[in-house]
Image (cartoon, helix red, strand yellow):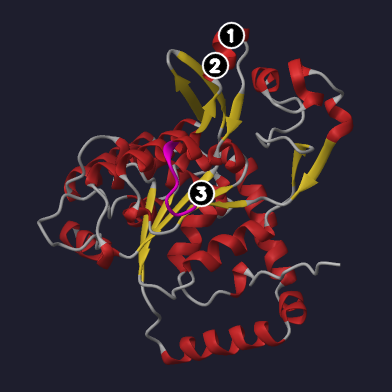
């Protein structure tokens, strides 16, 4: 019997509060278009992603569905699915529903575009008039988390494909004028070490949120990291039980926030504040304004409020604008809200 491998608890991660908050906000509101985590190795980036997925509520999917569809999913997808029970929408899907954990789908090194988006059997389409698709990684990521380590080393056109799907919630496979679309709604998380190269500004802008993390400098906090990790390695079961209630409370808070989000209201004066801030720090285009607004609303919902405050906007700006601010060559990515507030005072 294979033993279930324990995941280090998300709530037990020491420090890195902005990274954890950015991940939580993206789960509450997937339209934030993902998060880019920039920082050195060994700062709990991948640990945080897997740990967050581990505590999320189970989801319902059709058993063995290669597109990870929920009950009553897209009929067009079922028409081209290779599963005999799903052909032409056949089979009683209500009898084949299973619950499973949210998955973290990692992009393998060296992945091609066909491997990511999937492929169409063109010969079958031309000869028999039937669409048949071999699902790709984006199909596997539906209703889950897509994790791309060292995203800055990925070819630009592949990053474009991933960001397009994350923004639109669908994936389109097209070949010789024949196309097929299936749902691909996932939380996109990219990590990178800036020392190994940067993403183009156009791609940076497509990530909703961006956080810069580094090793903890406080001695007591570093001691806590060692103590907790040692305790987990020695007895994972006992360590996870110790954090079980805190994890459950976080999940309840996130669930309530997702339900509350549609009721969150933003005064028009706050919208003017967001626009003025984006202009002040030198943000091109309008995507930054929109993401700050969405982030501020999600923050308000996460904190149990239906009204966006100035504090929500300032924190949202720290998460949504650093990678969008116009910079001089070799200038580090960052946004100093304290300096901005001091200038305004």
Report x, y in % for residue 101. Answer: 72, 52
The structure residue drawn at horizontal position 68% and vertical position 60%, both measured from the top left corner, is 55
Report x, y in % for residue 245. Answer: 74, 69
- The residue where tag 2 is placed is 123
Q: Earlier in the sequence, mark 3 or mark 2?
A: 3
Give residue 7's quadrant in the image. Answer: bottom right
Q: Earlier in the sequence, mark 3 or mark 1?
A: 3
Q: Which residue is more in the foreground, 45 or 150? A: 150
Dominant secondary structure, magenta: loop
> How far separated are the C-alphas under marks 1 and 2?
6 Å
In the displayed structure image, the side of residue 101 where residue 46 appears, left or right = left
Q: Is residue 73 magenta?
A: no
Query: Would residue 129 be seen by someone viewing this image from the given angle?
Result: no
Report x, y in % for residue 36. Answer: 39, 54
Q: Which residues are magenta?
A: 107-113
Mark 3 or 1: the one toward you: 1
Give residue 261's quadrant in the image. Answer: top right
- The residue where tag 3 is placed is 26
């Amino acid at each position: 019997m294979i033993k279930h491998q324990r995941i280090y608890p998300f709530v037990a991660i020491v420090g890195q509060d902005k990274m954890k908050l950015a991940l939580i906000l993206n789960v509450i509101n997937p339209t934030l278009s993902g998060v880019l985590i920039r920082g050195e190795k060994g700062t709990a980036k991948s640990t945080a992603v897997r740990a967050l997925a581990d505590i999320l509520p189970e989801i319902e999917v059709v058993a063995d569905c290669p597109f990870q569809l929920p009950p009553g999913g897209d009929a067009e997808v079922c028409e081209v699915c290779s599963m005999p029970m799903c052909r032409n929408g056949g089979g009683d899907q209500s009898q084949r529903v299973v619950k499973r954990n949210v998955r973290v789908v990692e992009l393998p090194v060296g992945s091609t575009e066909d491997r990511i988006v999937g492929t169409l059997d063109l010969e079958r389409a031309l000869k028999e008039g039937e669409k048949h698709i071999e699902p790709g990684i984006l199909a596997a990521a539906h209703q889950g988390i897509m994790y791309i380590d060292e995203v800055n080393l990925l070819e630009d056109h592949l990053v474009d494909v991933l960001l397009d799907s994350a923004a639109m919630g669908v994936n389109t496979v097209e070949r010789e004028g024949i196309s097929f679309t299936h749902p691909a709604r996932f939380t996109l998380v990219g990590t990178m070490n800036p020392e190994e190269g940067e993403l183009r500004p156009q791609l940076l802008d497509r990530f909703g949120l961006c956080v810069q993390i580094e090793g903890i400098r406080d001695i007591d906090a570093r001691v806590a990291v060692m103590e907790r990790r040692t305790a987990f390695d020695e007895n994972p079961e006992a360590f996870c039980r110790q954090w079980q209630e805190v994890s459950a409370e976080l999940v309840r808070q996130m669930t309530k926030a997702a339900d509350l989000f549609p009721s969150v209201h933003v005064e028009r004066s706050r919208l003017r504040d967001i626009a003025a801030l984006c202009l002040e720090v030198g943000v091109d285009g309008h995507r930054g304004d929109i993401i700050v607004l969405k982030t501020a609303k999600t923050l308000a919902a996460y904190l149990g409020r239906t009204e966006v405050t100035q504090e929500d906007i300032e924190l949202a700006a720290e998460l949504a604008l650093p990678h969008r601010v116009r910079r001089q060559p070799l200038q580090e990515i960052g946004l100093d809200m304290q300096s901005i507030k001091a200038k305004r005072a």
